[in-house]
Image (tube, helix red, strand yellow):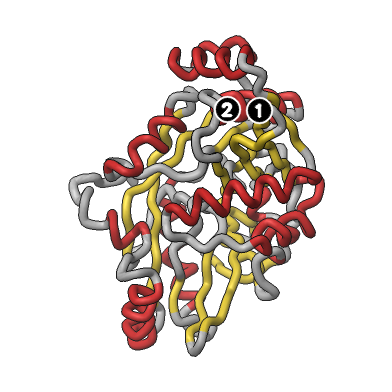
Amino acid sequence: MEIKYIKFSWNENFSICASENYLKSTTSEYGWIGGFVQGELKFVLPFIIKKRLIFRFLQFQTSTIYFDNSLTIKEEKIFLNKAIEFLKDKNIDFIKQSPKTGVFNIYPDGSIYALFGSYILDLRQAENQLWSGIHKKHRNVIRRAINGGVKIVMGKEYVDAAFQLVKQTMEKAGINFQREEIAQLQDVLDGNLAIFVAMHQDKPQGCAIMPFSQFAAYYFYGGSAPNAFLGSLNLLHWRAIKYFKSLGVKYYDFVGARINPKKELEGIQRFKSRFGGEFKKGYLWKYPLNKWKYGLYKPLFYLKNRRKGDIIDEEKNKYEEFSPKI
C-alpha cells in the first residue's frame, strides 16, 4: 500500500469534519493522507497540525474514510500502520488523540489506545419509527415541554444565547470555553452549521451547536440553563432530528460515549442513549513519534489540565479483554 498526501475532493456525502472549510477553521496547517493500492485510492484520513511551545503534533479529525466497501478492518490496520511509517520523517512529534468525531474501527500497532463509542441515530427511518424509538420518559417530557410553551428557534441570530449556555455549562466542568471556537465554525461553515436554542417565556433553556453535511449532523456543543424547563433539551433534539431528516441527512451523531462512564457522566450518556441511536464501539488512539518529546509533553499536559489526562489515559486499561476481529 502506498501512502501520500493528497488533495481531497470533499462533497456532502462525507463528514463535514473532512472538509477543507472545517479543517481550516481549526488551524492553517491541514491536509489529507491517502492510501493507494495499485494506484487506486482506498482510504483517506483528514488531519490538522498544530504547534505548542516546542511540540508539533498531528490530529486526525475523523475515523478512516473507506473508498471501497469490500475492504475490512484488516486492510484498515495495514493502512494505519503504513501511515505511521509515512509520518515518522515529517517532523511531527506525536499524533494526538482524535476529537470524539474520530472513533476508529481499529488502531495501529504501537499506539496508545482505549475503547470508546458514540450513539448514532439513523435518520433514514420513517419519522414515526424515529419517534417510537425514543425512550418513553423522553417522549413524556417532550410532550410536557410542548404543552408548557417551550419553543425551539434556530439561526445565526441566536449564537450569543447559545454561547452563554455552552460557556456556563462548561465552566461547571472546569472548562474555559471561548467565543472564538463558535465564531471560527460560523465563519467557514456558514450553511453547514445549525444553531438551535430552546426558549421558554423568552428565556434560553438549552442549546445545540451542530456542524453537518448530508452524511451526518454532529452534536458538537450543548448547554443548558440552571433549572431549565423540564424537557427543553429533549424537545430541542427531537426538533433537530426532524430538521436534519428533512434535509436528507443520513445520521445524527451525539458525539462521544464512554463504555462504562463514571457516575458524574451517567446522566449525560443516559440522555443520549434514550433517543434510540445505535451505540457504536470503536477506538480512540494516539502515537508518540518522537518518544523523547512526547515524554516531555505528557507531564506538561497533566499540569495544564489539573493533573487529568485525556480520555485515552482515563480509559486505556479498563477493557484489555476486548479484542477486535480482523
Decide which of 56, 174 is in the foreground and name it: 174
State whether residue 232 is above or below residue 308: above
Q: Which residue lies furthest to the left in this view?
A: 321
Decide which of 121, 178 is in the foreground and name it: 178
- Residue 305 screen position, x and y as percent: 38, 69
Q: Is residue 36 visible?
A: no
Badge 2 is on which residue? Answer: 232
Residue under the point 60% across and 42% down: 218
State whether residue 248 is above or below residue 56: above
Badge 1 is on which residue? Answer: 200
- Residue 106 screen position, x and y as percent: 39, 52
- Would you call the spot at circle 2 few (<14 residues within 10 Å), some (14-19), or many (20 or more)? many
Residue 33: quarter of image:
bottom right
Residue under the point 34% across and 73% down: 302
- What is the three-letter code of the residue carrying label 1? His
- Residue 250 screen position, x and y as percent: 64, 31
Residue under the point 37% across and 47% down: 116
State whether residue 120 is above or below residue 176: above
State how far apart marks 1 and 2 are (Cα): 8 Å
Are circles 1 and 2 on residues that touch, CB within 8 Å? yes
- Would you call the spot at circle 1 few (<14 residues within 10 Å), some (14-19), or many (20 or more)? some
- Relative to 140, 109 lies left or right: left
Residue 202: quarter of image:
top right
Q: Earlier in the sequence, mark 1 or mark 2?
A: 1
Kind of element beneath mark 2 = helix
Decide which of 29, 150 is in the foreground and name it: 150
- Residue 51 screen position, x and y as percent: 55, 81
